[in-house]
Amino acid sequence: HYVDEGRKDAPVVLMLHGNAGHVASRAPWLHYLQHTLGLSVFIFDYRGYGRSEGTPTVAGAIEDATAARAKLCELAQVKDAEMLLMGESLGGAIAVQLAADSAPSGLILQSTFSSLHDVAQAHYPNLAWLVPRNKLNSVAQIARYKGPLLQSHGNHDRTIPFVLGQKLFQAANEPKRFVTIELADHNNWLRDVYLQRLDDFIATIP
């Protein structure tokens, strides 16, 4: 794992990266979050990712994320309700699960999906029946979260279709904000319009 401490009084963030990510690949983003936004960030690799041992599974990733949040509570001396959850792509679905189980102070989702079944339906419609409808069903889980949400998605995303991000957002409770990142694909969503909205959102969190 990696901890970027920021200021002593900095908002605390648990970051959940996507399927193709690992701790080292997020170094520039971590630097921006700490030095520009003044956040204290904790990031880790799920089992089977980066240098973490084991075999990747959905259940394992959720277990790892739950353990990481407990560790961050210990390190930063905060409660679940006093930290932000930030999830990208697959990490967004895991962040939704954590938020549903125990609400954070705010939830930030980037380029994520309504459910794993919906992603399979978009890419492999003839095989989508192989993916259970309840597997990483973020639409069902996000309805259990009642807190601030900032969600963003590129409208040219070829990995997670934009409509799946919209479907998830529609299922979420207020207060919520959606940022459409024009012409952005799955991995090039770091645009000024989003960064400004992210800064504004964090400033509203108590």
Image (cartoon, rainbow, N blue to C red):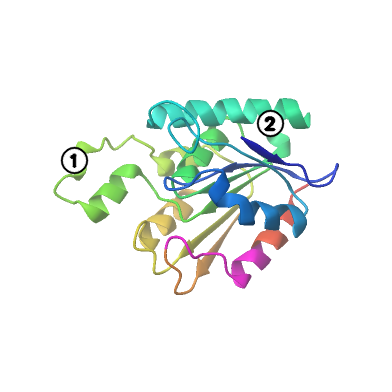
Residue 129 badge = 1
Using a 10 Å C-alpha cutoff, classify the residue at mark 1 as few (fewer than 14 neighbours), some (14 to 19) or many (20 or more).
Answer: few
Using a 10 Å C-alpha cutoff, classify the residue at mark 2 as few (fewer than 14 neighbours), some (14 to 19) or many (20 or more).
Answer: many
> Horizontal placement of 183 versus 23: left or right?
left
Residue 69 in percent (x, y) is at: 62, 30
Residue 167 in percent (x, y) is at: 40, 55
In the image, farthest residue toward the right: 8
Q: Nearer the viewer, residue 93 or 147?
A: 93
Q: Nearer the viewer, residue 80 or 28?
A: 28
Residue 72 badge = 2
Q: Is residue 152 magenta?
A: no
Amino acid carrying label 2: it is Leu
Q: Earlier in the sequence, mark 1 or mark 2?
A: 2
User: Depth-wise, is mark 1 or mark 2 nearer the camera?
Assistant: 2
Q: Is residue 159 visible?
A: yes
> Horizontal placement of 9 versus 203: left or right?
right
State yes or no: discs 1 and 2 in contact (Cβ < 8 Å): no
Q: Is residue 190 magenta?
A: yes
> Horizontal placement of 27 versus 122: left or right?
right
Relative height, residue 206 to residue 36 (above, below): above
In the image, farthest residue toward the bottom: 183
